[in-house]
């Protein structure tokens, strides 16, 4: 789906038993002056890492015949959406730059108590048919994990991503210091490796 | 649910100003005061 997912997220998914899923839904929106609230609610026993959304093409809908008609591209129609702690409220009008960026990348955790919330807007006089897909990885609410015993997959994911960042920034820091004082840094590196080997030995 | 029934149900809910969501587990996965779900197909 996205190369950055394969590089950094895929190892986490495989190591901690995430299951790939998607929900593809059809929606019919009436004209409305007040935005309509919708919550996308995961099952109570899971936490889901949403990795993307795919928007279909919004089309006019005739409720009398059930027929789906012409494509609607308009900034009078769209949605606000947010997820607590991961995505701030923002406006997605149904215009080409949003609808045709498929899949629309996301990286956010949702659960029964932290839902994916939307406010649908349809400031036209037409009924609108829309379909879309939520792509996600499903995890149990608690997982077995190294060092911490059991943990919340979302918390562990933050630790994992922080670890990647620390590792790479640490390498940069180390390289800088190495050029300033090679002998001292060589001794430090040897001490770190020795310590890492001891830990690795203890974990076997 | 037959297609005619589905169409009728969508029309009724749209006339009330509700948004209609259609998915096999729509009633479990989508909530909201103006949201009407249709669990289809099943």
Image (spheres, rainbow, N blue to C red):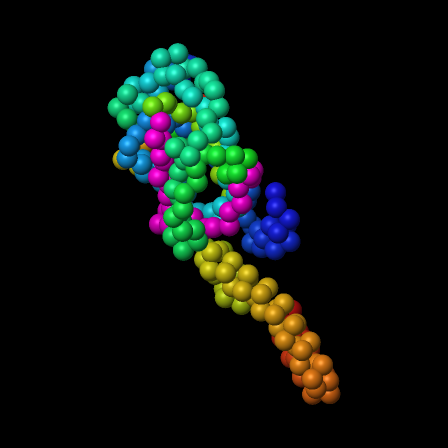
Residues A12 and A99: in front is A99
* Quadrant position of residue A128: top left
* Quadrant position of residue B39: top left
Inspect the magenta stretch and tell me whether residue B30 lies in it: no
- Farthest residue in the front direction? A75
* Residue A112 horizontal/vertical position (percent): 37, 46
Q: Is residue A140 visible?
A: no
Magenta segment's dominant SS is strand
Task: State which quarter of the image contains the C terminus of chain A.
Answer: bottom right
Point 54% across, 65% down: residue: A162
* Residue A72 horizontal/vertical position (percent): 46, 26
Residues A61 and A171: in front is A61
Residues A59 and A45: in front is A59
State the extent of the magenta-drawn residues as a range. Answer: A101-124
Point 73% across, 87% down: residue: A183
Q: Is residue A29 visible?
A: yes
Point 28% across, 32% down: residue: A33
Question: Left of A7 or right of it: where is A137?
Answer: left
Inspect the magenta stretch and tell me whether residue A119 lies in it: yes
**B13 w.r.t. A200: above or below:** above
Residues B21 and A97: in front is A97
Task: State which quarter of the image contains the N terminus of chain A.
Answer: top right
Point 32% across, 32% down: residue: B35
* Residue A149 horizontal/vertical position (percent): 50, 64
Count of marks overlaid on the render: 0
* Quadrant position of residue A91: top left
**B5 w.r.t. B39: above or below:** above
* Residue A19 horizontal/vertical position (percent): 54, 44
């Amino acid at each position: 789906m996205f190369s950055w997912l394969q590089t950094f997220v895929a190892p986490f998914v495989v190591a901690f038993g995430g299951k790939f899923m998607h929900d593809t839904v059809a929606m019919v929106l009436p004209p409305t002056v007040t935005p309509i609230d919708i919550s996308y609610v995961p099952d109570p026993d899971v936490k889901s890492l949403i990795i993307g959304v795919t928007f279909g093409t919004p089309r006019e809908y005739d409720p009398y015949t059930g027929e789906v008609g012409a494509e609607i591209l308009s900034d009078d129609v769209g949605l606000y959406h947010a997820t607590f702690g991961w995505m701030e409220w923002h406006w997605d009008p149904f215009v080409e730059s949003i609808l045709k960026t498929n899949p629309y990348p996301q990286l956010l955790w949702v659960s029964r108590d932290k839902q994916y919330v939307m406010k649908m807007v349809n400031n036209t006089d037409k009924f609108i048919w829309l379909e879309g897909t939520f792509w996600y990885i499903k995890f149990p609410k608690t997982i077995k994990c190294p060092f911490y015993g059991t943990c919340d997959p979302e918390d562990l994911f933050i630790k994992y991503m922080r670890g990647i960042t620390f590792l790479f920034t640490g390498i940069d820091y180390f390289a800088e210091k190495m050029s300033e004082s090679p002998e001292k840094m060589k001794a430090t590196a040897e001490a770190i490796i020795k310590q890492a080997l001891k830990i690795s030995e203890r974990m076997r | 649910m037959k297609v005619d029934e589905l169409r009728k149900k969508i029309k009724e809910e749209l006339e009330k100003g509700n948004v209609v969501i259609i998915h096999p587990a729509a009633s479990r996965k989508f909530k909201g005061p103006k949201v009407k779900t249709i669990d289809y197909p099943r």
